[in-house]
Amino acid sequence: MKGTIQILNISEYHCSLYLPPNYNILDVSYPVVYMNGNNNLEEIINSIESYFDIDCSSFILLNIESKNWNADFSPWPAPSLAKNGEDFSGCAYEYLNNLVNIIKPFIDAHYKTRTEPENTVLVGYSLSGITALYSLYLFGTFGKVGSLSGSLWYDRWIEFISSNSPINTDAKIYLSLGKSEERSRNQRIAKVGNCTQKTFDILSKQLVSTENIILEWNNGGHFTEISQRFSKALLWLMNL
């Protein structure tokens, strides 16, 4: 890895900040990718850094760890997937509000960023992927959004997006899912393939152009090649 990673605490969130090569040398500003959840930042960067300024723009990346996964990344309350598991408490709005109104302004104030929606990206995996998509209906902040193996089976998700519209209809959206993910014994999770396809179809009609959205099917299940899936999403979203 040629860039550098710093550890930050912003609004009580533990964050890892990646600065691209030449950040401290060149007098330029960069797009910012905000990444929900606890991800392998170094592995993701190692797989994409060589493409910078050839196939995709160089960018700053902030990985934000959740305080409570089932709270931060659930759009509204829902029962647990397991009989004795933790319920989803539905605090994604609070998380996104902190991201938009506290975390992003901090990054913009202290680093060389491009602040416009088209240069502000939000990506997430699994439950944090549905939260990335949820942001489209709450804020106009993120002009590029990626939901990787998103938990689009989530109760009432399809009903929600069917009856609401994205604030920024110019947004660029990347969706992906593993081909084996819908082969789950859990009846709720087993809907994920159908719900992901429905989400793609609905968003395709809500956005100004069908060229602004893609749905990519990957080999494997929910835990297959996660870092590589992030890299594929970022290459598409940040394509020059």
Image: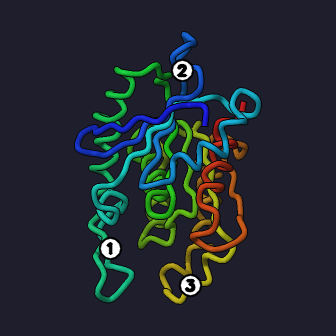
In the rendered image, the vertical position of residue 182 relative to residue 62, given as above or below: below
Q: Tell me the amino acid under the disc marked 1.
A: Ala
Of labels 3 and 1, earlier in sequence is: 1
Q: Tell me the amino acid under the disc marked 2.
A: Tyr
Q: Tell me the amino acid under the disc marked 3.
A: Ser
Give me the C-alpha separation between circle 2 and circle 3: 44 Å
Give me the C-alpha separation between circle 2 and circle 1: 43 Å
* Picture residue at 27% right of the left edge, 50% below the top: 94
- The residue that label 3 is drawn on is 184
Quadrant where the image shows the N terminus: top right
Tags 2 and 3 in contact by the CB under 8 Å rule?
A: no
In the rendered image, the vertical position of residue 185 relative to residue 150, given as above or below: below
Q: In x, y percent, where is residue 166?
A: 49, 45
In the rendered image, the vertical position of residue 25 relative to residue 89, given as above or below: above
- The residue that label 2 is drawn on is 23
Residue at the right extreme of this rendering: 54
Residue at the front extreme of this rendering: 1
Q: In x, y percent, where is residue 50?
A: 71, 36
Using the image as rendered, state which of residue 123 and residue 134 is in the foreground.
123
Q: In x, y percent, where is residue 45?
A: 59, 42
Of labels 2 and 3, earlier in sequence is: 2
Nearest to the eye among marks 2 and 3: give it: 2
Q: In terms of image quadrants, where is residue 77? A: bottom left
Helix, strand or loop at label 1? It is: loop
Give me the C-alpha separation between circle 3 and circle 1: 19 Å
Q: Left or right: where does residue 17 sit relative to residue 94?
A: right
- The residue that label 1 is drawn on is 78
* Picture residue at 65% right of the left edge, 69% below the top: 178
